[in-house]
Every structure is written in C-alpha cells, then in structure tokens.
Amino acid sequence: METLYLIFIDPFVQMVVEPAFLVEVLIGGLTSGVMYSLVALGFVLIFKASGIFNFAQGIFVLFAALNFVGLMDLGVHPILAFVITIGIMTALAFVVDRLVLRPLVNQDPIILFMATIGIAFFLEGFGETLWGGDVRPVRVGIPDEALFWEAGFGEILVQSADLFAGVIAAFLVTTLALFFHFTPVGRALRAVADDHQAALSVGIPLNNIWVIVWAVAGFVALAAGIMWGAKLGVQFALSTIALKALPVLILGGFTSIPGAIIGGLIVGAGEKVFENYWGVPLLEGATEDWFAYIVAMIFLFFRPQGLFGEKIIERV
Amino acid sequence: MLTKKLVMAGVAAAIAAGAIGVAQAEEGQFIPALTYRTGPFAPGGIPTANGYVDYFHLINERDGGVNGVKFIVEECEYGYKTDRGVECYDRLKDKHGGATAVSPYSTGTTYALIDKATADKIPILSMGYGRTSAADGRVFPYVFNFPATYWSQATAVIQYIANEMGGLEALKGQRFAFIFLDHPYGKEPIPTFDILAEKFGFTYDKYPVPFATGTEQKSVWLQIRRTKPAYIIMWGWGVMNATAVKEAANIKFDMSKFIGNWWSASEQDVLPAGDGAIGYKGATFNGAGTDYKVFEDMEGMSGLSDDGDRGTVLYNRGMVNAAYIVEAVRLAQEKYGKGKRVTGEQVRWAFENLDLTAEDIEGLGLTGLMPPTKVTCLNHEGTNPAILIQQWNGKGWDIITDWIPAMSDVVRPLIEQDAAQYAKDNNITPRDCS
C-alpha cells in the first residue's frame, strides 16, 4: 500500500506542496537536455546526409575539446585555438572520408557503422596519447555562477552556464537550419540525404559533400565539447556522457535537427523528474543512467521513426 | 658456410643473453604494477601509479635495492576495469620469478583477486581500500588493508563530525548526506553508517552516483539543496569528486561541512572548482607536499616520472604503498636470507609481522608521510587505525586535526562477523592466530 502511495500519490503531492523544487528540477532537466541535444545534433547531421550512424560522434566531442583545451594549455589564444581545432576537425573529416568512407562506399550500413566504432576506439586512444588522461578545465570566460531567483513561491537556483548552453544550442540550431535551407551546400546536403543516386545524376559531388558534413559535425562536436568541458572539465567521461544522445535521437528522430533539440529536452526533464520524485524514494536513486534508454525503448514500440523523423515506406 | 656460422653464433649469443636475462630477472624482486593511466579514472590513477613506481626506482638507484636485490617493476594498464585488472594479474603473476605483492588500487579488482591471489600465495596489499573484513587475518591470510579500512575511516569521520558539533550526543537528531560512487567501493561503508546511525541517533540520506560517468549529479545536488543536511560525507573516485565539489560550491553549500574520504580529497578533486573549493575537507592517512626528507633524495634523479604531480596527495600515497612493500621485503630478507630474492609467501609473513615505529619511519625519511603501523596475524588492518582531516586552502592541503582514532569497538565485531560469514560461505577453516 505504501509503495502504491509512493508511486501514485506522494510525488504529485510534493509537486504541489513544493512548486519551487519542481521548477528547479524542471530547469535542471531542461538545461541538461540542451547539453544532450548539442551532442545529438552531430549524429543527426551525419545520418541525415549520409545515412551513417556515426558511433564516433561522442569521441568527436571529446577529441575536439581535448585539442582545443590542449592548445590553450600550450599558450595559444582561445580564439586561435578554436580556429585551429576547427582545422583539425576538418582534416579529420577528410581523413575519415579518404581512409574509411570511400573504400566502404556501397557497403551495408552495418559495415559503415562498424567502421565508425573503429574510428571511435582509435580517436579515444589517439587523443589520450596526444594530451594525456588528466581532467583539463576549460577557462574561456563562460559564466559559471549560481543565480538565485526569488519567485513568488520560493527561491529557485539556476546555473548561468546552463543558460549559456541553451543560448549556444539555439544559435547552432538556427545557424544549421539557415545553412540547410538557404545555401547551395545545404541544399546539396539535403539532396544527397534524400537520394544519393539522384543527387549524383544532377552533378552533386558525393565525396565532397561527405567531407563537408563530417567537418560540420566536427564543428558541432567542438561547440558541444567546449560547453561540456566548461561544465565538467575536459575528461574521458565525456565520451560516455555523449552516448546519452542515443535515446535523444530515438525520441527526436535520426533525421530531424529540431527533433534532436526536443528529444534532448524530453530526456533531460524526464530523467530528472523521475529521479527526484520516483527514483530516490522507490529505487534508491541513480536512475539517470538507464531511465532515458527505457523511455526510448518504449517509444520505439509506438513511433519507431521518432517524433520528427521521416517515416520510411517501402512499396513492394 | 660463413652464413651458417654467423647464424649459429647469433643463436648461441641470443640463448646466452636470454639465460643471463633470466638469471638477472630471478635475482630481482618483481613488482607487478596494476595501473590505470587511461579512461575516466586516470586523473587519480596517474599520480598514484607515478608515486608507486618512482619509490621502487628511488630504492634501486639510491640504495641499490634492498640488500642488493633490486626491484623489477612492470606496469599493466587496466583502465580501472575489474575484468582487465584480473587479466593483468594473470599475465604478470609468474613473471621474473613470481610476484612479490600486488596492489590493484581498485576495490572491485581486489575483491576479484582474493581467491586467486590466495591460491597463488601472492599477498595483496589493498592499502586503505578493498574488502574491509579482510582485516581478519584468520580468514584472509593473503590480504592486507593497513593502515586503516573503510569501516574504520567511516567511524573516524563520524567521530570528527561529533567533535565539531560538541560530542557524540550532539549527533542525535542530525541529518547527514552520503554521496557515493554506485560501485562496490562506494557501498562498502554503508553497513557501518547504518550501525552508527542507530547507535548515535542520526539519519542519513544515500545518494548513489552512476558509475558509468560519475558526473550525473544534478539531481543529487537538487535533493541536497532541498534537504539541507548538517554535513555531507563523500565516498567518490575519479571525475565524480571534482563534479561534486563543483556542484557543492555552486549551491553555496558550506564547504567546511563537506568531507570526502581519503580517495575523495586530492588536488585533482578540488582544482576544477577553483576558489569555490576552499574549505573542503577530506580524510587522509598520508601527508601531502614535498616537505619530507625522501624528496630531497629524489632531486635530480633520472628515470623518475615527470615531477608535475610529485607531492600531491595521491602521488605520495603511491609512494607510501611502495614503502610498505619495500619494508616488508626487508623484513622478509632478515628472516629468510639477506641479499636473496624473497617469495610472495615470505613477503606475506613479513606483512603479518610488520611493526613500523616512528623511529623506523624517520630512518626512511618518511616522517609525516606515513603513519606507524603494527600488523598482526589476527589484525591485517593494523592495530591503531586512525585518520587525519585535511582542509583545502585554495593552494594546498592543511592538516587540521591530530590523528582521530577509529571506533574499533564498533568496527572489529563487524569485521569478524563478515569474515566468519565469508569463511562459512567458502568452506574456509579460519587459522589459529593465538
């Protein structure tokens, strides 16, 4: 009986009695969700343009951040370090295209997926060899203050770094949306995503497009890496955190940029609300590790293409 | 013909060189070093490994080894993953004539190695970690966890909090928070806290932090902000610690009431939080800094690790771990033959009869760096487990207390009870240590 009370009554009573805490949990969840979305964006870009699920995207986040902060530690100005890191990520895109994607073109998607797992392991080891395994703080002036907001029903804590991440995510999504819709390269990317052969037949160079999209995904990884690094320090746990983007993608759809954002917000808010109102009292906490994956699995039963993904219809 | 002769000569030379290599190897005292310099736990693993390896190098270079027997150290990287730790142990245990002792620096790996190492007659020195009930030497003859166990540490931390609040009576009705890594290591002190809570009338909320990342702590700190505990105790490792200290600083928690255990109070744990970490406290059993005689001997010595982490809490702890092994080898040689390589079994005897006094430690140039320790057959934890409390001042750690003894009257019965259960479950007949 007590268990039923803890499941169906108590959480809602607490939400009503302590609305300030509920707002804090929701804000905390939504801002965490934005951080997941930043990583998920990179996955979406590559999948949208090439149909490849890039398992290495999480490592891209870590690798980009490692290079950025490593260069800064060597005394390079942050802006120059940012530019050099974009160069490194572009060079990486070129190398991946030449050494991995081209030799495997026309192979099954699972083969390309396996290749990206190989890239992930290589980059993880390579990054560690280059820059070591220490946690490196990112000090680029991102505000990291606790803001206490006195609402009518209680005091609410908001981290300025989380708000900043939200602004960055909004900027990235807007920029990418404009890029996809209003530039020739963006239109070419969409054409390739729709139909490789049709795109080739009208003269769109597939290989160049792949390099571009992997480079753009590298840029998004750098932005995500800096934001995560500012929050937690650049460290190897980032590659594991990045895997939280998987349920985000399942919810939002693998081909939708707005879906990556909405999916992130749902996952972030959902896992924090569940942890605080059900996880801690009933399951002794630590539910954030698995909650998002369970939600994603349930979601797959009802809408496998995600909220905003394209429904694939194959006619016989 | 000439070619054939050259080949034969080459083969003969190679065989001879191999034979010499084996002879040399057999004369050395082999230390398998299970390390993790990669992965999420590398920030703690690197300085620990450096201190551990450097001390053996120092003994080889400065003293020519122990009575002329030099140490051979071989590292095996296992990324703090239990299965790979066991694999490293299996790969190294028989090399160079056999392992002297093994220190895995992981509670999970220590648990996994207890049966194997016992069968192989190789002692485990899980210095301040691992299975607490292994302190009962009757059931765990090959496992040592001096100078103090997690359970002793838990009682000493509660004793410190009581001292701060005005006595053990003041604990009644207090609410504390316990943040821990969701891993065997993090859960190890919970039975002790449960007993102490009942005995002294306080309550505590448990906050596990997922093992996979160690950084998913948003909900933990929202809960802590809501419940406003009088003190927070942390049993963390790796990146979890730095995240927790940073989050505590963000919610403006009084850092002087946030106490980490001895694996949650190193420089790597506080530096990322900047000035917000000032006031954070932690337990320890070894000194930090380089203001010890032994470091003078290391000045200018070649072959040591990069000196970037020398003097940090974990580097020094790695040195202390190695120093205990070196002194055990010295003691074993006194019994089994000076200047001869000693076996794991003989080192096990030495661990069990180790009695390092303050004078001994001064002679080693380690005063202040490691506590005096006396180990017995019955008590592998050492007879006087205790902790110091250190506090972060923004640049370094200040020791702010004298030794705070553990509540051995609480801990020892628990140890014996758990060890007896282990013996029963595994059909072990406890040794007679009387």
Image: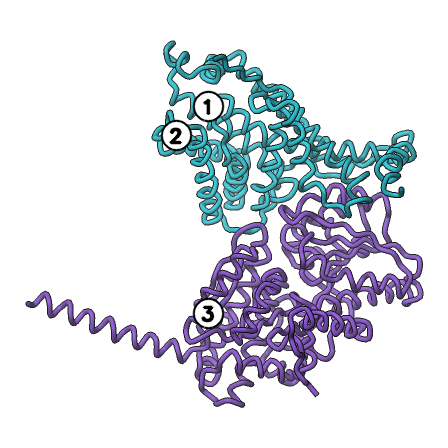
What colour has chain A? cyan
Q: Quadrant of residue B16?
A: bottom left
| Tag 3–tag 2 contact (CB < 8 Å) | no
The quadrant of the rendering that contains the N terminus of chain B is bottom left
Residue B80 to residue B15: above or below = above
In the current view of this chain or complex, which residue is farthest to the top?
Answer: A202
Q: Residues within 10 Å of mark 2 (few under 14, many from 20)?
A: many
Q: Residues within 10 Å of mark 1 (few under 14, many from 20)?
A: many
Left or right: B90 with respect to A309? left
Q: Position of residue B3 (x, y in %)?
A: 10, 65
Q: CA distance from mark 3 to mark 2?
A: 43 Å
- Tag 1, which chain? A
- Tag 2, which chain? A
Circle 1: residue type: Ser
Instruction: Identify residue for label 2.
Output: A101
Left or right: B172 with respect to A136? right
Task: Tell me which residue sits at (48%, 82%) in the image.
Answer: B342
N-term-proximal mark, 1 vs 2: 1
Circle 2: residue type: Leu
Q: Position of residue B9 (x, y in %)?
A: 16, 72
Q: CA distance from mark 1 to mark 2?
A: 10 Å
